[in-house]
């Protein structure tokens, strides 16, 4: 079936009609006829959004899992204690609620880390795999099997076996946090080796803290270069890189570029968790975006956690992430949008279709006149299209006192 998006504003600012034929954009121009017409006057057309780093298994547990210290260590402790009692049904229900929010905001591609390990086994993987199957027609979900610590040594044998089992049973990506391992270098080598054995990419939690040693980001880049790992590597967080002197950060960033790493900046969760022990001049807790960009590293951005002990906030809207990149990382509107669209898809190893004839019709229309306005207002009036199919639409109504409208008749008026 054909769908005609009438009078929509393109990212460059010009208005056009956009004809979708099946899963593809067929034509872009003026006065196009045919298909089911959707009038999008006043809406800006963007590529659909991507969430490159989520934790669906943890979503909406903020009121269930205490984190009195508010920092990363407190969140980890509280979560590990809580997760032993989780059921497949509970995880599935909360994750589905999160996916609904993501899709309503315009996300049609999402990567989620899923805990595996002691007290939990593969229950979370089972639940999120079921979610992935349920929503496959509206949102593509990649699952990272996030290994427990340690991976190295005799103590890590069971975790290594479980990571391999998770990849064999449907996880798309291998994950770990080598900086928490007694032997970070060995943990990286083991994760790469297990992933290579299954032909899977790697996405690691890297240096999610402010202290700069050891730099597991540099260890990861060295290992990828040394082994020639060819399945794709993503480094998430990379917080301590932002604490290095400029020249040092640039040197590590150039090594990351040579290893063809993608880096995912996670502003909201790291702004929430980091710097609590700095009474003054509190660090922002973000990676070195400027140095990474100068070195040519692909920089994506994600929300990370959604209302759980790691981040009490989060609404499942990548435009919230983009706004934080503009405010906290001083990125332009175009750079911030790219981090949650094109660059995010590149980090996930996916094509970047864009808005052009012949491209896949994965699109978001949002009530706005420009990319900057879309990020600033994050308007809830949105139309979400996946493969040419309308999968979500939100229309918001404001009823305001007559002093705030043009009615002037003493009644509430719609604006």
Image (spheres, rainbow, N blue to C red):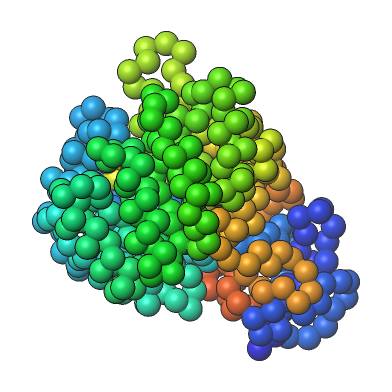
Q: Is residue 124 visible to us here?
A: no
Residue 74: quadrant of the picture: top left
Asked if residue 392 lies left or right of residue 4, the reply is left
Asked if residue 267 lies left or right of residue 367, the reply is left
Residue drawn at 85 percent across, 78 percent down: 32
Q: Is residue 284 above or below residue 265?
A: above
Residue 177 position, x and y percent, is 33, 45
Q: Is residue 284 visible to us here?
A: yes
Query: Among all residues in the image, which is located at the extreme top?
Result: 280
Residue 183 position, x and y percent, is 28, 39
Residue drawn at 43 percent across, 57 percent down: 202
Q: Is residue 218 above or below residue 12?
A: above
Residue 277 position, x and y percent, is 33, 18
Q: Is residue 98 above or below residue 407?
A: below
Asked if residue 33 lies left or right of residue 170, the reply is right
Q: Nearer the viewer, residue 291 or 361?
A: 291
Asked if residue 78 lies left or right of residue 229, the reply is left
Q: Nearer the viewer, residue 252 or 33?
A: 252
Residue drawn at 61 percent across, 44 percent down: 257
Q: Quadrant of the N terminus?
A: bottom right
Residue drawn at 33 percent across, 53 percent down: 190
Query: Among all residues in the image, which is located at the extreme bottom?
Result: 1
Q: Nearer the viewer, residue 375 or 156?
A: 156
Residue 160: quadrant of the picture: bottom left
Residue 301 position, x and y percent, is 53, 46
């Amino acid at each position: 079936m054909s769908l005609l998006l009438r009078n929509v504003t393109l990212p460059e600012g010009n208005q056009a009609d956009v004809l979708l034929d099946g899963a593809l954009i067929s034509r872009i121009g003026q006065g196009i006829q045919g298909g089911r017409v959707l009038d999008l006057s006043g809406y800006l057309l963007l590529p659909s959004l991507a969430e490159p780093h989520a934790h669906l298994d943890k979503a909406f547990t903020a009121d269930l899992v205490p984190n009195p210290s508010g920092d990363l260590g407190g969140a980890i402790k509280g979560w590990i204690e809580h997760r032993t009692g989780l059921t497949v049904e509970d995880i599935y229900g909360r994750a589905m609620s999160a996916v609904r929010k993501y899709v309503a905001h315009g996300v049609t591609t999402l990567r989620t880390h899923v805990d595996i390990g002691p007290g939990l086994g593969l229950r979370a993987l089972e639940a999120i795999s079921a979610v992935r199957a349920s929503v496959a027609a509206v949102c593509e979900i990649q699952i990272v099997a996030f290994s427990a610590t340690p991976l190295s040594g005799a103590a890590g044998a069971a975790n290594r076996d479980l990571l391999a089992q998770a990849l064999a049973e449907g996880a798309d990506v291998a994950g770990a946090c080598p900086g928490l391992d007694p032997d970070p270098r060995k943990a990286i080598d083991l994760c790469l080796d297990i992933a290579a054995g299954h032909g899977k990419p790697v996405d690691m939690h890297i240096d999610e803290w402010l202290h700069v040693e050891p730099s597991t980001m540099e260890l990861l880049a060295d290992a990828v270069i040394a082994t020639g790992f060819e399945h794709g590597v993503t480094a998430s967080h990379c917080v301590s890189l932002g604490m290095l002197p400029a020249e040092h950060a640039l040197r590590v960033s150039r090594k990351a570029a040579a290893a063809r790493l993608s880096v995912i900046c996670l502003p909201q969760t790291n702004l929430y968790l980091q710097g609590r022990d700095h009474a003054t001049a509190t660090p922002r807790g973000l990676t070195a975006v400027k140095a990474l960009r100068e070195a040519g590293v692909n920089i994506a951005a994600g929300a990370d956690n959604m209302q759980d002990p790691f981040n009490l906030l989060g609404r499942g809207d990548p435009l919230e992430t983009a706004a934080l990149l503009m405010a906290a990382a001083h990125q332009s509107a175009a750079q911030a949008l790219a981090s949650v669209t094109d660059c995010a898809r590149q980090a996930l190893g996916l094509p970047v279709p864009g808005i052009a004839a012949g491209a896949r019709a994965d699109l978001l229309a949002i009530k706005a006149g420009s990319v900057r306005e879309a990020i600033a207002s994050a308007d809830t009036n949105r139309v979400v299209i996946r493969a040419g199919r309308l999968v979500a639409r939100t229309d918001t109504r404001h009823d305001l006192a007559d002093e705030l409208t043009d009615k002037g008749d003493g009644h509430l008026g719609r604006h």
